[in-house]
Amino acid sequence: MSRIAVDAMGGDHAPAEVVWGAVAAARAGHTVSLVGDEERIRSVLDEAEADLEIVPASQVIEMADDAAKAIRDKRDASVAVAARLVADGEADGFVSAGSTGAAMAAAALIMGRLPGVTRPAIASLFPNHTVILDSGANVNCRPEDLGQFAVMGSALAQIHFGIESPRVGLVNIGEERGKGRDLEKETYRLLEQMPGINFIGNIEGRDLATDRAEVFVTDGYTGNVIIKTAEGASRLTLSLTLEAISDPGLQEAVAALGPSIAGLRHRLDPENTGGGHLLGVDGVAVIAHGSSSRVAIVSAITLAAEGIEGDLPNRISDGLARAAALAG
Amino acid sequence: MSRIAVDAMGGDHAPAEVVWGAVAAARAGHTVSLVGDEERIRSVLDEAEADLEIVPASQVIEMADDAAKAIRDKRDASVAVAARLVADGEADGFVSAGSTGAAMAAAALIMGRLPGVTRPAIASLFPNHTVILDSGANVNCRPEDLGQFAVMGSALAQIHFGIESPRVGLVNIGEERGKGRDLEKETYRLLEQMPGINFIGNIEGRDLATDRAEVFVTDGYTGNVIIKTAEGASRLTLSLTLEAISDPGLQEAVAALGPSIAGLRHRLDPENTGGGHLLGVDGVAVIAHGSSSRVAIVSAITLAAEGIEGDLPNRISDGLARAAALAG
């Protein structure tokens, strides 16, 4: 049974929503430890009439802190203690809705990177069996980084979508070879020759609505722009839909469809995708949205559990080693 | 009365759909000249029982052609002749659904750039009073290019949205100053100091669904990724909406909402935004989607007419001159 350390102090609504989410996940069968201010966590647990393990941590990293410096200086910060539980083998993965930079720094510095990984990347999952990486860890990337993202994203897609040979696409501004910046041109040539990768060529943002690829590879600036644009466009489309059907004569029909539309809103809400895996570090690390509600925390814990059960870090290591051996 | 030269040979469904679209625009009051193969255009006009002016052009630029080279070699290409009509003052603007590269090269080489413009940019309009530029003309940009995009996009937003002082946002991966790549960091400092620009700071793709800014400034790679991601996410949301309400028990309600949903699909369909203005060239140039239907051609002609009536090129010149004078 995998054990997940949850940073109870990270997030806009911490610790209350995080603790409530952890309680719900525990009731659904997950083994969860809460890391942070013992007294504050205990008070929420009492309210929830639950009894989860608490691992005390006396410090908190604030959003304004310099992340890498804070991880070094605040050794008893909740996210650092959570990462240390994983590094020491006392937990199999951690979840944090706190500062993304701090969670990345904690994972990279305390758990360490997997052998050969140059840059860990954040992989975001979309509701339609798509994973996009890097979605924000590295604003500047080299072609070889994107090559590693292809391997790491494929491992994640294998586990989460149950696909043996996930299709990998390179995000670009056209389908034809030779499109894009130098980064895309060079990465195209690299991915084409890379063993163990099912590279299908260039893809575009519009392929979020097609079935061309499961893994979208791009740099962290572009990936971040993609997930936020998709969020904005999806919200705009839903609000225009509601506006389009706001005619008073249609209210009976709208009422009949209400529950279905509400279900869809829930499914599309980025809060409910649970956040993203940080790939390339030695252990499972899930970075949840800062605004996570208890529902989002349950999703993030579930995401971490799936990664642990699928042996994500080892699968990534194997993939990178195989690619290196075949290429060499 | 403004006169618009339409490249009848450009686009996946040329000349038929282009000519039908031009006829519809003429019937709605626009003055349109069709540029291209006289015989083929005449045959569609006969079918439409219409009589528009034809300006003969014997050559066509294919999608596979090298755009800049083709403009120099094929002097009688339809898009080159259309641009020449504008350069010679015989038309006030042109519309082409052919190769984007060829239309850009025709505008820049034949009509010429406005004084001081380093890089013309494609500006795409979104249904919610938003303009994004550059959306594909320049994959690599410098901060000073993005500064010019801010001025040019503001002029376009003034005309098309009727806003006196459009709010300009810099596309980035977070709202805080100091986010992003070197390009964003340097552009932020530039826009902050730029006179005549209503700069509101960093914006994100999710702001497509908010009311924070009318002008989204970014490089052509990122802008292209944004418009295609928005298209994909919007399609995905609509198709998931239809899936969510596909329960047999809801069909009566769905039928009642059908016309409203169809209207929304039409409004969100990128075909119906009419394409984008090429800004920074000496005259109005609208680049329509290659897959343009007759409806899309009407939208593109309307877009061009609005730019002409709003005196778009002069307004851009004035804005650039004012910014240069105030900065100097």
Image (cartoon, coloured by chain):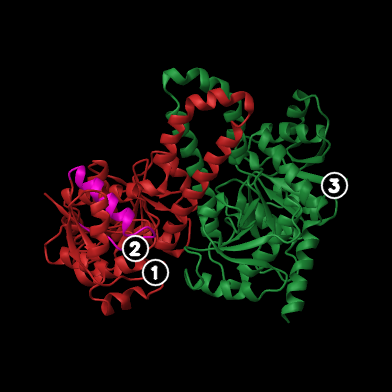
Chain colours: A green, B red
For the C terminus of chain B, the quadrant is: bottom left
The residue under label 3 is which amino acid type? Ser
Give the quarter of the image for residue A31: top right
Q: CA distance from mark 2 to mark 1?
A: 8 Å
Q: Residue at x 37, y 40 (%)?
A: B128
Q: Are marks 2 and 1 on the same chain?
A: yes
**Labelled disc at residue A2:** 3
Residue at the bottom extreme, as displayed: A328
Whichever of labels 2 and 1 marks the residue nearer the N terminus, that label is: 1
**Labelled disc at residue B98:** 2
Please give the range of residues in magenta. B5-29
Nearer the observer, B293 or B153: B293
Nearer the observer, A44 or A215: A215
Q: CA distance from mark 2 to mark 3?
A: 57 Å
Q: Residue A54, how many percent across, how many down?
A: 80, 38
Determine the secondary structure under disc 3. Answer: loop
The residue under label 2 is which amino acid type? Gly
Circle 2/circle 1 CB separation < 8 Å: yes
Q: Residue at x 51, y 55 (%)?
A: A205
Give the quarter of the image for residue A201: bottom right
How many residues crowd mark 1 within 10 Å: few (<14), some (14–19), many (20+)?
Answer: some
Q: Residue at x 23, y 76 (%)?
A: B75
Residue carrying label 1: B63
Number of marks drawn: 3
Q: Residue B192, how many percent across, how many down?
A: 33, 54
Q: Residue B81, how many percent across, how many down?
A: 21, 68
Q: Residue at x 70, y 40 (%)?
A: A299
Q: CA distance from mark 3 to mark 1?
A: 55 Å
